[in-house]
């Protein structure tokens, strides 16, 4: 009887571990699918996402580069290919850094990643502006900016 209880306990533990493992894999796949949806697809073509490819960015709403100029309602971002993109800022645009940020934190020359909605004139209305995004930081080097 004692051996049966031990065997049943071991089986229950193994089943629990298997279910946890399976659940973890499903959660990871869900997170990856969400990231792919947010960044314009899962083909690994980062160039499409940044707006430097022929398609003008994933769904046209993502911009990555450095701020060339700015005013109260827009910023002009220099893209990696040397072209530029106007980004319209609105009252609902959110700003983020390694900590929370505001529009006042935007400075000419700052590196940004912008996510938003493309406009018919080629500009983008920003939903979110990320200052000093991770994609600009060299691999293996921690950021020294807060």
Image (cartoon, grey):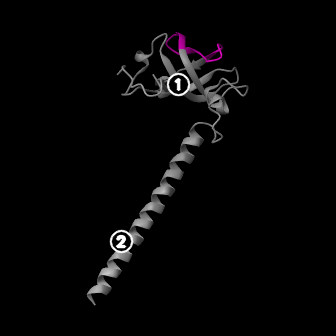
Q: Is residue 4 left or right of residue 61?
A: left
Quadrant of image for the C terminus: top left
Instruction: Tell me which numbered mark, 2 or 1, is placed earlier along the sequence.
Output: 2
Q: Is residue 103 above or below residue 49?
A: above
Neighbour class for label 2 at 10 Å: few (<14), some, many (≥20)?
A: few
Secondary structure under tag 1 reads: strand
Residue displayed at 49% across by 18% down: 111
Q: Quadrant location of residue 35? A: top right
The circle drawn on residue 113 is: 1
Say whether residue 82 is magenta. Answer: yes
Any part of residue 9 in sight: yes
- Judged from the image, the secondary structure of the residue bearing numbered disc 2 is helix
Q: Is residue 92 visible?
A: no
**Residue tagged by mark 2?**
13
Of residues 144 and 100, which is closer to you in this image? 144
Q: Nearer the viewer, mark 2 or mark 1?
A: 2
Residue that appears at 58% across and 36% down: 39
Where residue 93 sits in the image (x, y, percent)?
49, 27
Position of 99 relative to 6 (above/below): above
In the orientation shown, which residue stands out farthest toward the right? 54
Q: Residues within 10 Å of mark 1 (few under 14, many from 20)?
A: many
Residue 50 placement, left or right of 140: right
For the N terminus, the image quarter is bottom left
Q: Which residues are magenta?
A: 67-85
């Amino acid at each position: 009887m004692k051996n049966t209880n031990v065997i049943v306990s071991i089986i229950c533990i193994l089943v629990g571990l298997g279910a946890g493992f399976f659940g973890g894999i499903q959660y990871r796949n869900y997170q990856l699918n969400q990231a792919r949806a947010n960044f314009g697809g899962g083909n690994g073509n980062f160039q499409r996402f940044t707006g430097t490819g022929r398609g003008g960015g994933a769904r046209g709403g993502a911009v990555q580069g450095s701020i060339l100029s700015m005013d109260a309602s827009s910023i002009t971002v220099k893209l990696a290919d040397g072209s530029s993109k106007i980004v319209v800022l609105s009252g609902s645009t959110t700003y983020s850094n390694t900590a929370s940020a505001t529009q006042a934190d935007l400075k000419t020359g700052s590196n940004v990643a912008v996510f938003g909605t493309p406009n018919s004139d080629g500009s983008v209305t920003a939903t979110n502006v990320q200052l000093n995004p991770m994609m600009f930081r060299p691999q293996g080097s921690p950021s020294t900016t807060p």
